[in-house]
Structures are given as C-alpha cells and as structure tokens.
Image (cartoon, helix red, strand yellow):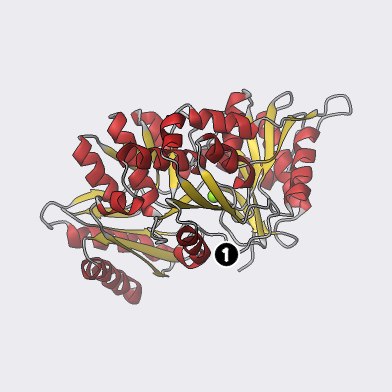
Amino acid sequence: MDRLMVSVSGVRGTVGKTLTPRVAMEFGCAFGTMLGAGRTVTISRDTRPSGAMLRSAVAAGLTACGVNVVDLGVVTTPGAALMTRTLGCDGGVILTASHNPSPYNGIKFLQPSGPALPADQAERLKEIWRQGNFALQDSLHTGSESHNADTHETHVTAVCETVDPAAIAAGGFTAVLDSINGAGCAASPILLKRLGCKLVHLNAEPTGRFAHEPEPIEPNLGALGQAVLREKANVGFAQDPDADRLVLVDEQGRFIGEEYTLALAAAFVLRHRKGKLAVNLSTSRMIDDIAAAAGVEVVRAPTGEANVVEAMQREGCIFGGEGNGGVIDPRVVSVRDSLTGMAMILQYLAETGKPLSELVAAIPAYHLLKLKFPCPADAAAKVVEKTRAAFANRPGATFNNADGLRINLSDRWVSVRASNTEPIMRIFAEAPSRADAEALAGEVQALAQSVIGAG
Ligand code: MG
C-alpha cells in the first residue's frame, strides 16, 4: 500500500504521490515549531534527484518558523550528523530514503549530537505536524539561510584521527568501492586516498540514478565481486545511498555478508581497547563470541539505530552498531558510518597482514535465518507469550523482552516480534548450522500459527 510512513526514523514516502512539497514544508514547520524561533539546524540531502525540491520545501517551513538553516549540500548521513554536532546546531534534517528504491525519498530529523530524534521527541514532532498549529513568524523574524561546504573534509579528518593512516598506506591496498551513485561518492575517495589506497570507484557519479537496486545485499553486488577479482583488489566495499551502511567483498570476490562488517570491526576495535559493545537484538551472535574472547560485555538494544545509540551512551560503550552493515564509533560520530567502517577494516588488514577471507574464517560462523508471516496486530502479544512459555524450561534459556521476545540458548538464539508498520511478525533464528536455525525458527512459527489459527 502506498502511504506516507511517519515513524521514529522519520518520514518516508513516494515522491510526487505521498511525499509532496506540501508534506515536506509542513514537517519543516513542525520541526521549527518544536525547536522554537532563533534556533539553528543543518539541512542536507543524499543524491536523489528529488532532494533539492524537498530540501527547499523543508527549509521554507523551518525558516517560516524563525529557525536558521545551514545548508550542507549533498553529504552522507554520518557527515550530516557530525556537522550538526560540530557546528553546535540545535538539530538537523536530512533528505534521504537510505537504501529504499528510487521512487522513495524521506525526511530524517537529528538531535544536536547527531543521532535521530529519540522516540518521545519523534512522537511530539508527529503530533505537532498532525495538529498543524505552526508557530509562523512575522516578516521581521523569519529564519536565515547559509551554506557550509566543510562536511567531507571534517568527516574524513575525524575518521583518520581514529586510525593510523601511515600504517594503512604501508599496506599498499587496492580497494574497489561501489557508491551506488549516492552520497558516498564525494567523501569516500578523499578518505581512501588519504589512507594511501589505490581506489577503483564504481557508480561514482552523485546523480542519484542507482545503477542497481540500492540495498547493499548479495543479489545487488555481483559487479562489485567481479571488479575485485579483475582488479586483484584486497577488498570490495559497498555503500547504501546515504553511506551509513557498509558491506564487504573479500579478495576472492566473495560477498561475505552484511553481518560480518560489524563483527570484523568489533574484532579490530577489541585488539586495541577493551570496553562494552552495544548492538541490536537481531544482530548475529558472532559479536558475542568476539566479545567473550576479549572478556567484554555486549549490550543488546531494541531494533533501531536510535536505540543502539541510547544504549551506547547509557552503558558507556566504546563501540556499537547493527548487523545490517552499520558501524558506530562514538569518537567520530554516534551514528552508523561507512567511512569509519572502511578505515577500520583497512587497518585490520594492515595490522594482521592477512587477507580478508582469512580474517572472516577466524570468526565462528553461524546461519542467520529471517522469515516473516502475516499476523493480526491483536495476536502478536499472544504469540510472544506462548513462545516464552514453550521455552521457559529449556536448559540455559535466557529471555530479553525489550523488543518482542529474544530467547538466547547456549550456542543459538531465536526472536519473534511484530512489525511496527505492517500486520506481520518476524522470526529470526541463528544457529551453528542451517538445519538447526530452520528447526528453531520452525518451532516458533508453529507456535505462532497455533495462536493465529485459534484466533
Ligand atoms: Mg542508510
């Protein structure tokens, strides 16, 4: 169904249908009303062709409410978050639909430190938008607009301060990068050149016209694997259109799975520093093995980047992220950052002198199975309750109910939760073998079906 999605992650819709200039301007007014006249926010966009139009509409709404706007231009999501913090702004707005296909665009609202708004503020913003009573200012008190072109340089410098560029350069690496003609096109080559890499850059024009489906998953990245082999590269990197997520291809041209980006980055970080990690509840348990070997704790947060960041801040974590290729180093900025991820992986290669395939093979492998099925909203709580009861006496079982239900067993886990946006439930199961993961997921699905069938 084509409808405007308004969630804790922001606004998302199809351009010209559900996401119109009117909607964008109204959300600009709503954010301006929430912040108050005299405040200052950054505004930025990914490369989608509709970005300029939506930017102008949001900026009109913000300035109409007396908020000053600093336009960063076309930049990555982590770059925009970093600049919002660096410039001491009161918030930020990014026009992006992340990995969603071309017909979509979206509006993401940032807090002053960079991450997306916490749930309570996102809810308040939605309510102000819904009511439509905006704090429009008179002709002498509308906001101003200025431009800032420092994002790429500020971002690259911040990333380079967390690694050893000379050590990476000494490795003499060749990297192939697929930037999907997205926001990563500009900053990423600056970083990789500063790290002394030879770069082969695919889909490097910031046109927003995606050369393949933009989600960085295996079926969409065949050309990257071929280019790694052809160029005899050490690594292949793929970004999503707003360059917060990073996916890897090894030196043999093999897609190694988005879960490995975070696992490898965590293994690298823990070689140097010891401290807690935070990830979401659906991230692979590879990270638990890596953390256990280093003697550190993994904090599990509900799904959603803002929840992971909140857990990182609350628990004083040194590193965190999401299994979808989202690496968060709070020393750079507290959002997922593909540039930080690339720098970490390259330094890991340099320090160990091992090929990427060998570093991957050193991490205990699991099979992570994801399935979904229709479930009426009123049945979801019963499914969770019945699943918990069925596993209550399982030896060693521990339960996390921060987001649906996740059941941890000795070397495997299963989770079941209702979608926030659709009448479906999702089951994730991870185990040392595919058959074990299927059996675990199947057991929970059978429980669910018995509830739904009885309803
Ligand atoms: Mg993204």
Q: Position of residue 332 (x, y in %)?
A: 49, 30
Q: Nearer the viewer, residue 349 or 232?
A: 232
- Residue at the image position 25 percent from the left and 40 percent from the top: 291
- Mark 1 is on which residue type? Glu
Judged left or right of residue 4, residue 251 is left
Compared with residue 86, is residue 268 higher up or lower down, i.e. above or below? below
Compared with residue 85, is residue 294 higher up or lower down, i.e. above or below? below
- Residue at the image position 78 percent from the left and 33 percent from the top: 63
Q: Position of residue 236 (x, y in %)?
A: 46, 53
Judged left or right of residue 364, residue 10 is right
Judged left or right of residue 194, residue 173 is left
Q: Residue furthest right?
A: 139
Q: Nearer the viewer, residue 320 or 353?
A: 353
Mark yes or no: residue 211 visible: yes
Disc 1 within 8 angstroms of ligand 1 (CB): no
Q: Position of residue 411 (x, y in %)?
A: 18, 55
Please give the residue where the numbered disc 1 appears in the rendered image: 213
- Residue at the image position 65 percent from the left and 61 percent from the top: 102
Q: Quadrant of residue 436?
A: bottom left
Q: Quadrant of the C terminus?
A: bottom left
Mark yes or no: residue 8 visible: no
Q: Quadrant of residue 314?
A: top left
Q: Quadrant of residue 365?
A: bottom left
Q: Quadrant of the N terminus?
A: bottom right
